[in-house]
Image (cartoon, rainbow, N blue to C red):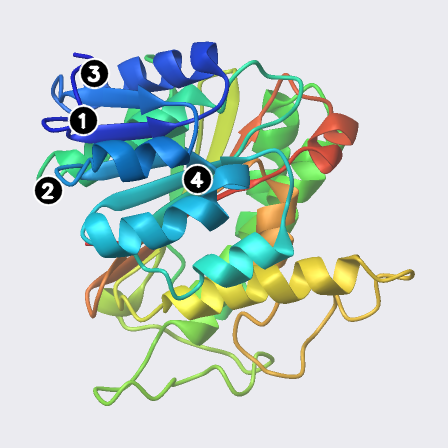
Amino acid sequence: MNVGPEIADILVIEPNPVVARRAARVLSAAASMATYAVIEEVEELARAGFSRARLVACNAELWPRASDWQANTAPKAHVMLWTQDNDRALIESCAKRTRVGAIVGWPRFLSTPRLWEVGQFARRAMVAKSVPTVEQLLEWGSTTRVWSPADSVEIEPIVSEVRALAESSSPHPRVADRVGECAYELLMNAVYDAPSLADGTPRYAMDRTQHVQLEDWERPTLQLATDGVRLALSATDPFGGLQRWHVFESIARGLSASATADGAGVVDSSRGGAGLGFFKMFSSASTLLVTVDRGRATEVTLFWDLDVHPRDLRAAPSSVHFWNV
């Protein structure tokens, strides 16, 4: 319901009124018909207040002027930004702004940001204990395959299976290559980097060449799911140790390195652990969605739009979502 600023639970800040109204309707529906207000200019914030807002969705071009208002007037609001560029400065500025839960890529060939991303953000932010499964984020009738490696030897065979399934699901062979590369990165992170001792010290991350045999309770889960329109790849580990800064720093460093004339620095193995792996996954897929239940589980999920040619995907901005539950 579109209401006045004094009672709006959701605030949309977007200069295109058609996009703003459509996004607001999706946000409201996903948030159990929460009330919403739409504004086109940041200057309206000072006049109207909007102190009740619990969710703010904002065009990233307006965020530099809206961020101070959010910090001072609605500091507990969940924030989602949408952008038509992979902006390193934006990623860096949001790394420590923990209320910014998502930076949603808005490809120029789409009339709005991806509305399924908009809706799932609102559901998570506004509905208690609402963490959607991979299947719930795809269309009805999707199919899922699941693996749970017991040791490092199983990584390569699983990646081969994942790539073969992705190739049969996608009209573009390059997508299958990217899915396979991301499956390898996800499994290496889950098998080598995630396991830790009680004090948080990594058990295996210092040597990614050693053979690792996992205890039953340490085993990660890898899922591949598709509805024929999108393909999702998700890895879950039972440790919940991934930090927000790790994801955002990896993406920011990768964007900075890729902006150089020769791309020098994009490949980086000097730090161990995930390094620039999150940048590689972010730039390979259309959406990177991270959910951390601290000390219990980390889930990293990637989505590809199967109807988008890889050439167009390379030029389109990617999305990053990060949630602590």
Look at the picture and state if 238 lies above or below 228: below
Look at the picture and state if 38 lies above or below 1: below
Q: Earlier in the sequence, mark 2 or mark 3?
A: 3
Mark 2 highlights which residue?
129
Name the amino acid type tagged 3. Answer: Ala
Mark 4 highlights which residue?
81
Name the amino acid type tagged 4. Answer: Leu
Where does the image place residue 81, in percent across and percent down from the top left? Answer: 43, 39
The residue mark sitting in front, 3 or 1, is: 1
The residue mark sitting in front, 4 or 3, is: 4
Measure how far apart labels 4 and 1 are at the Cα level.
20 Å
Mark 3 highlights which residue?
29
Near mark 1 (Cα within 10 A), the count class, few <14, some 14-19 or many ≥20, is many
Q: Does residue 222 appear left or right of residue 305 in this picture?
A: left
Near mark 4 (Cα within 10 A), the count class, few <14, some 14-19 or many ≥20, is many
Q: Which residue lies furthest to the front in this view?
A: 47
The residue mark sitting in front, 1 or 2, is: 1
User: Which quarter of the picture shows residue 165?
Assistant: top right
Where does the image place residue 217, in percent across and percent down from the top left? Answer: 22, 66
User: Which quarter of the picture shows residue 266?
Assistant: bottom right
Q: Do the residues labelled 2 and 3 touch (CB within 8 Å)?
A: no
Q: Is mark 4 on a helix, strand or loop?
A: strand
Measure how far apart labels 2 and 3 are at the Cα level.
17 Å
Residues 72 and 101: in front is 72
Mark carried by residue 97:
none
Where does the image place residue 61, in percent across and percent down from the top left? Answer: 55, 39
Which part of the image, by quadrant, shows the N terminus? top left
